[in-house]
Amino acid sequence: MRISARADYAVRAVLELAVQQGDCPVKAEAVATAQDIPYKFLEGILGDLRRGGVVESRRGGGGGFRLAREAWAITVADVIRAVDGPIVSVRGERPTGLSYTGTAQPLLPLWIALRANVRRILEGVTIADLAADALPDPVRELAAEPAAWENP
């Protein structure tokens, strides 16, 4: 599985909004600067996040972006889906839309299991968890495994 630059930037932008926003919306320029995200790229990402119901925007001098719901109600999966679509796909298709025959039949449950594991992690981590540096224990435990940090 690959996390696209778009998805990485989107999660970072939403996290920045969660941390920076008080009563006032946050300007896109401030998010771009704080996270070192190219501003033009961020504009498109914020548009996708707005259409996906993750952020909302206000125009004008006091305008900017803010989370559309509380940070505890937005998962990392919500953010990724808003900018990249389905979290796990095979050749651009959702695993449930695939079928295999013959010796390839065992691939379908493998792809489904992969999707279930990825979803379990990304749907189990909220923006509030990240903002508080409080990842859920199962995620911390996985990241603490030495093999997780190796590139085979």
Image (cartoon, rainbow, N blue to C red):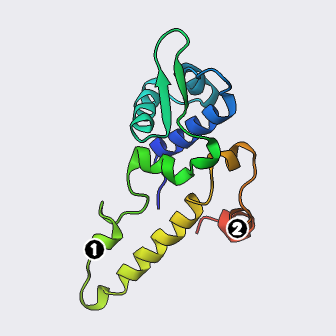
Mark 2: few/some/many CA within 10 Å (<14, 14-19, 20+): few
53 vs 122, nearest the viewer:
53
Q: Which residue is mark 1?
A: 98
- Give me the C-alpha separation between circle 1 and circle 2: 30 Å
Q: Residue at x 70, y 63 (%)?
A: 143
Q: Quadrant of residue 16 in the image? A: top right
Secondary structure under the numbered disc 1 in the rendered image: loop
Q: Earlier in the sequence, mark 1 or mark 2?
A: 1
Using the image, determine if residue 65 lies above or below residue 103: above
Q: Amino acid at mark 1?
A: Leu
Secondary structure under the numbered disc 2 in the rendered image: helix
73 vs 46, nearest the viewer:
73
Instruction: Please state the horizontal and vertical placement of residue 99, each as a whole percent of the image.
Output: 26, 79
Q: Quadrant of the C terminus?
A: bottom right
118 vs 3, nearest the viewer:
118
Q: Amino acid at mark 2?
A: Pro
Q: Residue at x 47, y 56 (%)?
A: 2
Instruction: Please state the horizontal and vertical placement of residue 111, each as a whole percent of the image.
Output: 41, 74
Q: Residue at x 34, y 70 (%)?
A: 95
Q: Quadrant of residue 53 in the image? A: top left
Instruction: Please state the horizontal and vertical placement of residue 127, each as a whole percent of the image.
Output: 63, 46
**Mark linked to residue 138:** 2
